[in-house]
Image (cartoon, helix red, strand yellow):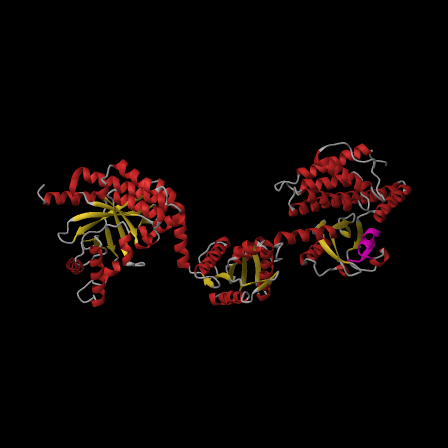
């Protein structure tokens, strides 16, 4: 037929694919006869091309593509090179287009080839059946018709482009066509000297030969497998193999018919795509996907013992920023090579991404075994890296996991190893850290609290307790310290130590501090409405991060104005460490508030730098002495002469600077009496009052007014 006039004038991607397909099947030697016009042939290929594109979606069944291959065969495109050229065109087109994932494309191409082969086999078997029918008819009437049909089948068998062979039930090869023999480097006569079992290959799946034996027993009529053959020159030929059972007139197995399609190029392409999908392109190591598969498999076996080493290069970003990404990439390549060289057989080294690597250690039933591997990997970085004339000393930090711990999935285990690696970095880098389940649970809880804090602020889960501060002379309540609590729906009431640091780390300290200040000022205003001049000063803790916020001063002034609280009824507490970092604008903000009458206190004095001379430069009113100073005088037997001398010196210096001094954590009467004797002004602690809600403070103030006869 003369249908090679070129592609039609269609449009869109299908037209381009049709043009390529038509050209491929028109070019070169043609040994197939297609009973259709050029227009009909183009219409057929256009429809097949569109059908292939429509079936490309991941959720679409591959049977649609198999039917496309079958339609090509049923249209008499059955020449020697039709299937091979068709697969080459489809593979090249969709690989260039990038519209189909590599593994999905390989799956679709396989389905197309299988459909083509099945249709060809069906046609061939139909032809054989026609031979049998002709034989019966010949016995009855026309012997010549049998000879014609037999000749037709012989021509199809010998000239078909698909490898075809016939063997008996003993496995002896009776006949093969030229295509099959040439595929393996033989002449047809040479292959007829072999048995089916002579064509085994080291990569044969043992189950394949079980299927073949079941076929010989008549348990199956057809088997389709992917099989490797050994070519006479030693190379491997990969094929799609279809084996059909031919029965006699009584239904007993008589022969096996094989149809063989060479898929070596497609198999090599699939292997390359599989390798690329599971290996890092830069280092050649297994990638994250392959490692996750291996870890999941190990995790799925409850009896499997294994460990993890999660590795991260220290200061890798500095290398990239200083020397460029080309040097950084070479560093990763060399680091990967060192890790791979240090790994023992059976240990899987993978690149997780960036400068992170991970090692799966089998049979690691103790942390010291995995720790030994971690130290081996750290030793790999002892020698500097020589990259483009730069000698780079790069260390690594390693997180060590031994076994599953209490993690329920591979992802949780990997995340724990990653977290442990950051513990090693926090401890100084260039070392390994071993996972600690208790620490892991604490940090997990902290992470959950950090994530829940915005919602807690919005849902009003935070509330205030107040601890009274009393004058040591008459134990009259002169102030209260506002202490924030979190009424967590699952963990109960949390103290500031459990979440205030988190608020500073995650950027929520501003919102938290604003909420605490507003509530404390509202409570102070309510007390002033009832008790006037007997209203205690309300003391609110403030972080260095809040004071550093340029909007903080305006916020404090706005809260004072909105609540109507007198400035001298408010005290702001900063820790000694916070004051050490408060300079410039933040320090000026404190001075502005102090000039307005707000009291400024330094909290936990004595736990930080303790620069007594620096006190005179601060806008202070109150120094709050830290608990450790007070605990040293818990009983008459506990204080030493040095402790008392230091305490007395601090009190004298505080008074000399014009400040008052408050002692924290006073728990015994002896402490209170001793502090009073040393001249301490006020104190707070469990000896006097524990933290209490606002209404209890109201009750105390009311009782005090009654006692004073008002």
Q: Quadrant of the N terminus?
A: top right
User: Where residue 541 sits: x, y (%)?
Assistant: 29, 48
Is 536 placed left or right of 91 in the picture? left
* Residue 702 percent coordinates (x, y): 15, 42
Residue 177 in view, yes or no: no
Q: Where's the C terminus, which quadrant?
A: top left
Position of 108 with respect to 456 (left or right) is: right
Q: Nearer the viewer, residue 65 or 549?
A: 549
Residue 529 highlighted magenta (yes or no): no
Which corner quadrant of the image does residue 662 belong to? bottom left
Q: Is residue 494 left or right of residue 84?
A: left
Residue at position x 47%, y 65% from top? 367
Of the pair 322 and 701, the residue shown nearer to us = 322
In the image, residue 13 sits, relative to residue 221, either above or below, namely above
Residue placed most toward the observer, 24 or 201: 24
Give how far across and how far down residue 148 sits, in percent: 89, 43
Task: Give the residues in magenta.
Answer: 171-185
């Amino acid at each position: 037929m003369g249908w090679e006039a070129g592609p039609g004038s269609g449009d869109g991607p299908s037209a381009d694919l049709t043009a390529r397909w038509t050209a491929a099947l028109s070019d070169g030697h043609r040994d197939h006869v297609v009973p259709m016009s050029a227009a009909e042939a183009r219409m057929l290929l256009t429809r097949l091309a569109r059908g292939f594109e429509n079936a490309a979606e991941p959720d679409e069944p591959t049977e649609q593509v198999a039917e496309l291959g079958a339609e090509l065969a049923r249209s008499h495109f059955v020449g020697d090179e039709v299937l091979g050229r068709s697969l080459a065109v489809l593979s090249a087109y969709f690989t260039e287009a990038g519209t189909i994932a590599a593994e999905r494309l390989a799956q679709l191409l396989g389905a197309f080839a299988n459909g083509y082969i099945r249709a060809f086999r069906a046609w061939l078997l139909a032809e054989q059946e026609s031979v049998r029918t002709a034989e019966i008819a010949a016995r009855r009437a026309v012997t010549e018709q049998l000879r014609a049909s037999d000749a037709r089948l012989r021509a199809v068998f010998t000239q078909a482009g698909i490898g075809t062979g016939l063997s008996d039930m003993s496995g002896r090869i009776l006949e093969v066509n030229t295509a099959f023999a040439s595929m393996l480097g033989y002449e047809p006569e040479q292959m007829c000297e072999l048995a089916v079992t002579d064509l085994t290959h080291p990569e044969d799946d043992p189950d394949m030969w079980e299927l073949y034996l079941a076929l010989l027993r008549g348990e199956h009529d057809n088997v389709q497998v992917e099989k490797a053959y050994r070519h006479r020159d030693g190379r491997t030929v990969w094929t799609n193999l279809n084996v059909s059972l031919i029965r006699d007139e009584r239904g007993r197995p008589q022969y096996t018919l094989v149809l063989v399609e060479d898929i070596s190029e497609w198999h090599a392409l699939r292997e390359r795509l599989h390798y690329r999908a599971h290996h890092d392109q830069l280092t050649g190591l297994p990638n994250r996907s392959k490692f996750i598969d291996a870890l999941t498999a190990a995790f799925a076996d409850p009896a499997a013992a294994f460990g993890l080493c999660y590795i991260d290069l220290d200061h890798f970003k500095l290398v990239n920023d200083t020397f460029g990404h080309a040097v950084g990439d070479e560093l990763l390549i060399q680091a990967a090579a060192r890790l791979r060289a240090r790994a023992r057989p059976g240990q899987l080294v993978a690149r997780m991404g960036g400068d992170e690597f991970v090692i799966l250690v089998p049979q690691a039933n103790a942390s010291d075994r995995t720790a030994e591997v971690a130290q081996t990997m750290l030793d790999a970085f002892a020698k500097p890296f020589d990259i483009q004339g730069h000698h780079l000393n790069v260390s690594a930090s390693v997180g060590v996991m031994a076994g599953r711990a209490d993690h329920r999935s591979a992802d949780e285990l990997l995340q724990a190893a990653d977290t442990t690696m950051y513990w090693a970095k926090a401890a100084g880098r260039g070392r390994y850290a071993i996972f600690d389940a208790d620490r892991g649970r604490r940090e997990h809880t902290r992470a959950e609290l950090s994530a829940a804090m915005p919602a807690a602020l919005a849902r009003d889960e935070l509330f205030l307790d107040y601890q009274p501060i009393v004058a040591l002379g008459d134990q009259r309540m002169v102030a209260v310290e506002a202490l924030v609590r979190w009424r967590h729906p699952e963990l109960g009431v949390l103290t500031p130590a459990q979440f205030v640091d988190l608020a500073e780390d995650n950027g929520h300290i501003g919102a938290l501090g604003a909420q605490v200040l507003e509530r404390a000022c509202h409570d102070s205003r309510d007390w002033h409405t009832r008790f006037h001049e007997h209203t205690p000063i309300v003391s609110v803790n403030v972080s260095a991060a809040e004071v550093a916020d340029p909007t903080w001063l305006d916020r404090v002034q706005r809260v004072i104005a909105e609540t109507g609280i007198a400035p001298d009824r408010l005290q702001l507490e900063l820790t000694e460490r916070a004051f050490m970092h408060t300079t410039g604008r933040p320090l000026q903000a404190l001075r502005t508030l102090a000039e307005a009458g707000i009291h400024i206190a330094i909290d936990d004095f004595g736990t930080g730098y303790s620069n007594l001379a620096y006190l005179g430069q601060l806008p202070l009113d109150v120094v709050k002495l830290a608990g450790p100073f007070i605990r040293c005088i818990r009983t008459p037997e506990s204080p030493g002469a040095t402790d008392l001398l230091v305490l007395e010196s601090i009190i004298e210096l505080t008074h000399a600077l014009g400040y008052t001094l408050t002692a924290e954590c006073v728990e015994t009467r002896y402490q209170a009496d001793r502090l009073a004797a040393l001249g301490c002004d006020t104190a707070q602690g469990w000896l006097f009052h524990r933290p209490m809600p606002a209404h209890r403070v109201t009750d105390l103030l009311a009782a005090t007014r009654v006692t004073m006869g008002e």
